[in-house]
Amino acid sequence: MGGELTEAATPSGCEYAGEYMSKRFSMFWGCTIPARFPFIEKSTRLVIEDLGSEVAEVQGYTCCPEGTLVKAVDEEAYYVTAARNLALTEAADLPLVTPCNGCYSTFKSTAAALKADWRRRDRVNDLLGTEGLRLEEGPSIKHFAEWLYDELGPAAIAKGARRSFGGMRVAVHYGCHLLRPSPAVRWDSATNPTKLEELVKALGATVVDYETKMDCCGGALDRVGERDGALEFCRRKLTNMKQERVDALVVVCPSCFQQFDLNQATLLRQKEALDIPVVYYSELLALAMGRTPEELGLGLHRVSVEPFLHKWAREAEVRAEIAKEFSVAELQKCNDCRACEEDCPVAKVQPQFSPTTIIGEILSGDLEGVIERGDLWKCLDCFTCYEKCHSRLGMAEVFRKLKELATQRGELPQAVRFSYDMFVSTGALGEPRESVRAKLGLAPLAERGGDELARILARREGRTRPTTAAGRTEDEGGAA
């Protein structure tokens, strides 16, 4: 009959495990992952292990079954098969989690249909009863992405990630059956979802929107013999992503993975250079948690992930350098938002000045170029961006730091250099016009303390002074 439990995987115990109770559930792998993409199974098992959770193996599972090939031909067989799998899980007294959109939609739709139609439920249970099975309320059913989002959440995932994907431009494809049909499937909006994007952003990547994001992958056309149509769906979506300069596509469905990885490989053989690596979310998460590409089997993808991995390594080096001077997370948040761009007073008068573009240039590793070009000095220190920033970040502190770095490198506008010289020499930025003051009946100003201030400032250790064009500080005998 099936339904017995085999020995469960042993959780490794990671930093998540101390904060979150370990979860034990049945993982319904479906047909496609074990048969065609065992590397997706590997990364998913490793992630579950690293999260301190446990997979219990329920024996006796069959195909979920798949809708296009079964439901359209024999609806009763569809419901009986799905109900049997759910009954096995219920008999084991476990929740069910699946990393396959199709299996998820099948189980959620079957549960909803049998709950709504008691005659169909009774007919199904009569058939299951011949093998000693019965489906009552049924188990909890969640997609793997749903389990991650609900049981941990993006904030906890971000906290536990050991390596960031900062600087990487990633597109996501939800897949139809992760979101539909509603109301049987209720995890996220069927037309305007955000949760998968939140899970990707939690790993530091920039999620790139694209026009065809909510379109079907088209993979089901292959199942009914429409090969050219399937390839056209693949071509259309990937071309759209390429226009948006994405570094990789993240999916949460093996059928969608097959469409974009295997069929893209076909297009590559036809000299259509799309070259967009495709990764299942658990692979991305496993990399962020410290697993290596080799132990995940990423080399088994048909479209090479090496360009993605190489860029990721370069970005990590760049951001390590940036982190010496700035908060990379705050820079990234600012760059992704850009809400205050139109509020900048200078940008209103000089549209060619873009403070958020400067933020992006820093993140790209062009800090020296930003300093040399000198646009940073156009920041007025008006704090408009800070006051209007919903995250209370603004860009004022970034530009203050840029000016400090520019000063250290001697990249000051002449006007700034002249004013600073006056300040350190006199303790003021201008001499009073006593004749005009006298005409207005104002008394002479009290004696000023510029000389004393200059002596105090000169005694500071490790002070930063502007350099001359020849690279000498004032202390070295050159005028600052």
Image: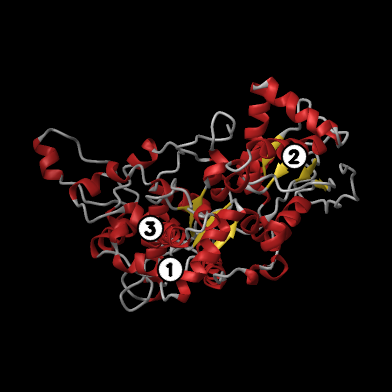
Amino acid beneath label 2: Leu
**Residue identified by numbered label 3:** 240
Q: Residue at x 77, y 38 (%)?
A: 84
User: Which one is in front, 89 or 159?
Assistant: 89
Q: Does 126 sit left or right of 259 as displayed?
A: right
Of marks 1 and 2, which one's residue comes earlier in the chain?
2
Q: Is residue 352 visible?
A: yes
User: Which one is in front, 291 or 301?
Assistant: 301
**Extreme-bottom residue of the structure:** 470
> What distance separates the C-alpha of mark 3 from that of mark 2?
35 Å
- Quadrant in the rendering for residue 184: top right
**Residue identified by numbered label 2:** 96
**Residue identified by numbered label 1:** 274
SS for dot 2: strand
> What distance separates the C-alpha of mark 1 from that of mark 2?
37 Å
- Mark 1 nearby-residue class (10 Å; few <14, some 14–19, many ≥20): some
Say whether marks 3 and 2 touch (CB < 8 Å).
no
Q: Percent x, y for residue 88?
A: 82, 38
The C terminus sits in image quarter: bottom left
**Extreme-front residue of the structure:** 73
Q: Quick check: 344 above or below 94?
A: below
Q: Does 34 sit left or right of 302 as displayed?
A: right
SS for dot 1: loop
Amino acid beneath label 1: Leu
